[in-house]
Amino acid sequence: MSEIIENQTAREERLKGIVQRIEGLPTLPTILAQMNRMMLDPKTTAKDMAQLIASDPTVTARILKVVNSAFYGFPSRISTISHAIVILGFNTVKSIVLSSSVFDTFGGNGSQDGGFKREDFWRHSLACGAAAKVIGRHAGEAALEEFFIAGLLHDVGKVVLDHGLREDYAAIRTDVKARGILIREAEEARLGINHADVGGWLFSEWKLNRGLVKAVACHHNPVLADEHMKAASIVHLADIFARALQVGSGGDDQIPPIRQAAWDAVGLKVEHMTDLLRETELEIVKASVFLDFVRA
Amino acid sequence: MDAVPAELLPLDKVSPGAVLAADVKDAKGNMLVGEGRILTEEWIKRLQGRSITHVKVRAVGDSSSVAPSVAPAGNDRRLKRLEAMFSKVAAEPLMQALAASARQILEERRT
């Protein structure tokens, strides 16, 4: 155990060194910062929040698109942000704004310089989000949208590294191809940290909720997520299920093994695996509206 | 996402899993179900009960969806890739079960 703690401290030092080298680190999107502030103020009403969001036409259009999509499947059309907030709640609306911001920051055009294919990357992300929602449901969890968002954004560190450390990441991709290893292994070999560390670090800088930060940071090693181990385990399993379904690409052609501790923490049954994969496929179709953000 | 022409189909020819490409309204113009909804067997029955005869759908698996391709040739390639992908973790019981489930889904699609 002390060895693990020692490794963690050394790792955090390395992570600090890496993020200092990243050029043009994305700052917290203004609209999210404003929402954070408003949510802390007990006097904030749904109307205040709706006014803030309505001042950004792109975000407004995206929220209405998602809320009226098959992802929620409400029987009648929701045409205003205030109505969306009443139905979905502040937190869910904030999650949609968050994913919209991340897509804007890291969206479509990274592949021109030989970076990994964004379309495949986001398809894998979407599949992971969908799987996380399905697994959460099987595990008796309530906040399924939060698992979806954690799955959708679990690999954000890959795009941060691909944007910010181009040469290193090009070498990492070459290494993955040449040696047939996982992208995480190639990152560890070259940088001494991996994309999960970087993603967790970014979201923590953005002051996002700790459950999301831990789920992203620990999706390859959920035992390190402390009280959020179950959330991190759900994203860990979802990533592997998404790879088994071969939807999109996480940047390599291998599948990491399921960690037994994560499996136990979530409490799924082996005999339900096929059903879980089938349900995930349906959930992917329902959630595909999120991919429109990247292309729009 | 590429726009794929939606097809107007008789409701009894629609398979579960198809995605509605347009809102469905009854004769009086009341909204029954919105665009984007995945039609399950239950939804199809419900719409039949409301005397709906035709709906506009796009199929799951066409290029407007993100579900894996259903083409048989693509399936063989996927099976091959599945074996390669799992080769290094083949000794782990949980991964054996996962590979078997993924294989089963691909096999089912072939038939």
Image (tube, helix red, strand yellow):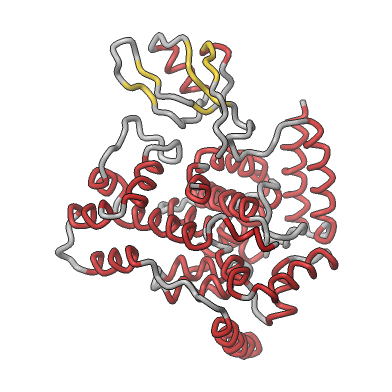
Q: Quadrant of residue A28?
A: bottom left
Determine the residue positioned at 36% across, 35% down: A74
The picture places residue A261, in percent across and down from the top left corner, at: 63, 66
Quarter of the picture holding the N terminus of chain B: top right
Q: Nearer the viewer, residue A202 or A222?
A: A202
The picture places residue B67, in percent across and down from the top left corner, at: 63, 38
The picture places residue A167, in percent across and down from the top left corner, at: 69, 75
Quarter of the picture holding the C terminus of chain B: top right
Residue A222, visible in the rendered structure: no
Q: Quadrant of residue A284?
A: top right
Indicate whether A248 appears above or below B24. Answer: below
Indicate whether A261 appears above or below A244. Answer: below
Indicate whether A200 appears above or below B9. Answer: below
Residue A78, visible in the rendered structure: yes
The picture places residue A129, in percent across and down from the top left corner, at: 54, 52
Residue at the far left: name it.
A43
Determine the residue positioned at 23% across, 65% down: A38
Left or right of residue A195, residue A66 in this image: left
